[in-house]
Each structure stands twice: as C-alpha cells, then as structure tokens.
Amino acid sequence: MKNRITDLNDHLFAQMERLADDDLSGDKLDAEVQRTEAMVKIADKIVDNARLGIQAATLVANHGDRFRKDLPMLSAPKQIDAK
C-alpha cells in the first residue's frame, strides 16, 4: 500500500466501484458496506492528519520560527550521529 493522499483517493473510488456492482447482494453487500464504513473512518483520520500538517506549515509560513519553542512538534526530528 502506498502512503499518499492521492492513493487514498484511488482506494476510496475503487471502493465506490465495488459498492456499485449490481451483482453484489445479501451477505456480500453487507460485508462490502462494513468494509466501506471502516475505510471511511480511517480516511477521515488520514485527512484530518494531513489538514493538521497543512495548518502547522501555514503557521510557520505566516509567523516564522517564533512559535517553534512553544510547539516542538513542528521542528524536524533530531538527527542521530552515525558511529
């Protein structure tokens, strides 16, 4: 599995196509609906996380580094020296 928002989009559209299958009925349809609900919950969290990253980048772009000391999670991870 890939880890980009565009890939998430592809997965969601593929799921829509599976739900649109006219031959899907009964237990198979129920299972596909449950799968869809699970995918939507995960997709919502991924989109929320991406939105938060954009908001953090916007904060830094608009206000520079003055918030970095108060928001250390915006800083790049510390590099470990190679031995």
Image: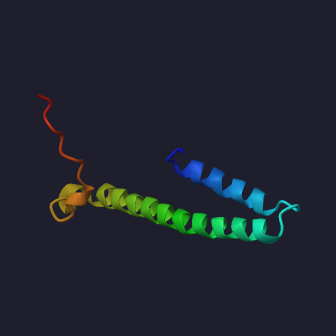
Looking at the image, which residue is at 62% across and 70% down? 37
Q: How is the image coloured?
A: rainbow
Residue 68 at x, y percent in the picture: 20, 59
Is residue 45 left or right of 36 when viewed as pictured? left
**Residue found at the very far right of the displayed protein:** 22
**Residue found at the very far top of the displayed protein:** 83
Residue 70 at x, y percent in the picture: 17, 65
Of 28 and 10, the residue lying toward us: 28
Looking at the image, which residue is at 41% across and 58% down? 54
Of 8 and 22, the residue lying toward us: 22
Q: Quadrant of the C terminus?
A: top left
Against 24, is 78 above or below?
above
Q: Quadrant of the N terminus?
A: top right
> In which quadrant of the rendered view does residue 29 lie?
bottom right
Looking at the image, which residue is at 76% across and 58% down? 18
Residue 51 at x, y percent in the picture: 45, 63
**Residue found at the very far front of the displayed protein:** 27
